[in-house]
Amino acid sequence: MLNLVLAATSFAAIHLLVSGTRVRDTLVLRIGAPAYLGLFSLVSAGVLAWLIVAYAKVRVPEVTPLVEWRWIAVVCVFVAFVFATLGLMTRSPTAVGGETLLADGQGPTGIHRITRHPFLWGVALWSVTHMVFNAGLPHLLFFGAFAVVALAGTVSIDQKRARIHGDSWQRYAAVTSSVPFLAVAQGRNKIALGELGVVKLLVAAGLFALVAALHARMFGVAPF
């Protein structure tokens, strides 16, 4: 269990204390953006692998006491897959390499009208859902690390873009929101279903169906 605690703490620490902070800015100035991105990606992948292995060694498949409410978990995870998949498949100023969209003055499209951080909110929803329906300590440590990193990431990315891009970021932030649907509810944007993309939605649904079909074999618990 100690190994899992250390892995979860390390995974959270490298994102909370480095990525998106002024430490990151200093490292970029000293070694350059490409070198920093490569180094951080390598370290992050290594710590992620450590976290997964540590969790796999101590996790015990559990049937949730909230079994009659499991359909809620299925719906939430499906929404999480939609947010995460569309977030990865839609260009955005908040994604790595997407900063040029700010210079072009391009406004939000598709899923980014709903939230400017769809991937991170998808990860957060997936994590929190698993924490609610899997209350054991190993599950809370594992999924909690992802939830903390994802939610903190929405803040750190906004702060980093604001520091670097100033007015162009403020114009983009004015018509978007980090919290899903907030900008829409406030009248600063509107949902455009046609921009979401049928292919992207089908990819999200296909990935969800694949994971659901393999879930019992891979993790010992059937989602349905």
Image (spheres, rainbow, N blue to C red):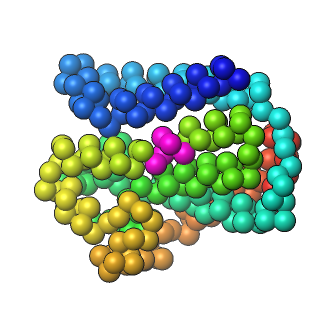
Residue 115 image-quadrant placement:
bottom left
User: In which quadrant is the C terminus drawn?
Assistant: bottom right
In reply to whether residue 150 is colored magenta, the answer given is yes
Asked whether, in this view, residue 201 is left or right of residue 191, the answer is: right
Q: Position of residue 4 (x, y in %)?
A: 65, 25
Q: Which residues are magenta?
A: 147-151
Q: Position of residue 173 (x, y in %)?
A: 26, 61
Q: Is residue 85 visible?
A: no
> Which residue sits furthest left?
167
Q: Position of residue 159 (x, y in %)?
A: 27, 46
Asked whether, in this view, residue 168 is left or right of residue 177, the answer is: left
User: At x 38% / y 76%, what residue is drawn?
Assistant: 184
User: In which quadrant is the N terminus drawn?
Assistant: top right
Residue 137 image-quadrant placement:
top right
Q: Is residue 115 visible?
A: yes
Vertical placement of residue 142 versus 104, above or below: above
- Work out whether residue 153 or residue 137 is closer to the camera in this orientation and state it: 137
